[in-house]
Image (cartoon, rainbow, N blue to C red):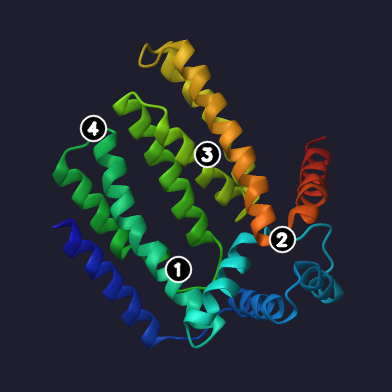
Amino acid sequence: MLLCIVAAGVLLRIVIFMIDPVLSRDSILYVFLAEKWQESGSFAEVCTFFNSFVKSAYWIPPLFLWLLKTLAPLFPSVAVAGIVLNILTGSALIAILYFLVRSLGGEKNVALLCAAFTAVHPTLVELSIAIQRDNLYLFFCALVFLLLLQAKRRNTPWPVVGAGMLLAAAALTRYETFELLLFLPILTLGACLSGELSFRKGIYAVAILFITAVVAFFLLGVIMETQSWLLPNYGEYFSRKWNNLF
């Protein structure tokens, strides 16, 4: 049944895109910048080009554009690569939500209902056929929570390592991931106080998660050749966020 729901979700997304294949303004911008990166081979040049007509103190995280320009040779264009990437991750989100509900103790029928809702929800369908970062960000975050639940359920730290890697990928997709990091220790503390998790295992899990995330964050930066850009840009973002609070 789950396979049928996912297949229906994929078909729905493809049909809606074929009916209205017009790209949004942001989608066109992402495609253009990914093509610029592909042509120049330098993320620094892309940033310089972007800042020449968009005045911003910091730039968007690079992972989404890097995926677009890396996948582009496999497809007719960067735009097609972006659509395929988002349809696949958006459709995978249907199955991920099913397993999330099951990991939380939900019955199979409830999980299937949630998966069906995800498959047809207008906003999620729209995100799946737009070349934007939101869909990829939701995909990474959902997998992080699923792996953390699996680690607790199976009483093993290995899924936490995977969650840390995906957390780094999410952080390189949207800055908001770092704000999400504030809630993970709080959720872990809540699980410890409720007796569902021992304090020793909770501290151990949080340490593994953050260490893995930091290592993966900089390793992905090296792979994308954006390591020199990461700290100054993220530092500027959070400096401005902090100043806006006070």
Of labels 2 and 4, earlier in sequence is: 4
Q: Name the residue located 77 percent from the left edge and 72 percent from the top edge.
A: 46
Please state which of residues 18 and 66 is positioned toward the viewer in this rendering.
Answer: 66
Callout 4: SS:
loop
Q: How many neighbours does mark 3 have within 10 angstroms: few (below 14), some (14-19), or many (20 or more)?
A: many
Q: Mark 3 to mark 1: distance in Å?
A: 22 Å
Q: Mark 4 to mark 1: distance in Å?
A: 29 Å
Residue that badge 2 annotates = 225
Between disc 2 and disc 1, the foreground one is: 2
In the rendered image, the vertical position of residue 142 relative to residue 104, given as above or below: below
68 sits left or right of 53 in the view? left
Of labels 3 and 1, earlier in sequence is: 1
Q: Where's residue 76, x and y in %? A: 49, 88
On the image, which quarter does residue 103 sit in? top left
In the rendered image, the vertical position of residue 96 relative to residue 183, given as above or below: below
Q: Mark 2 to mark 1: distance in Å?
A: 23 Å
**Looking at the rendered structure, which numbered label has been put on residue 164?**
3
Figure quadrant of the N terminus: bottom left
Residue that badge 1 annotates = 86
Q: Where's residue 156, x and y in %? A: 36, 26
Say what amino acid the circle numbered 1 marks: Asn
Residue that badge 4 annotates = 105
Q: Are marks 4 and 1 in contact (CB under 8 Å)?
A: no
Residue 126 seen in the current view: no
Between disc 3 and disc 4, the foreground one is: 3
Q: How many neighbours does mark 2 have within 10 angstroms: few (below 14), some (14-19), or many (20 or more)?
A: some
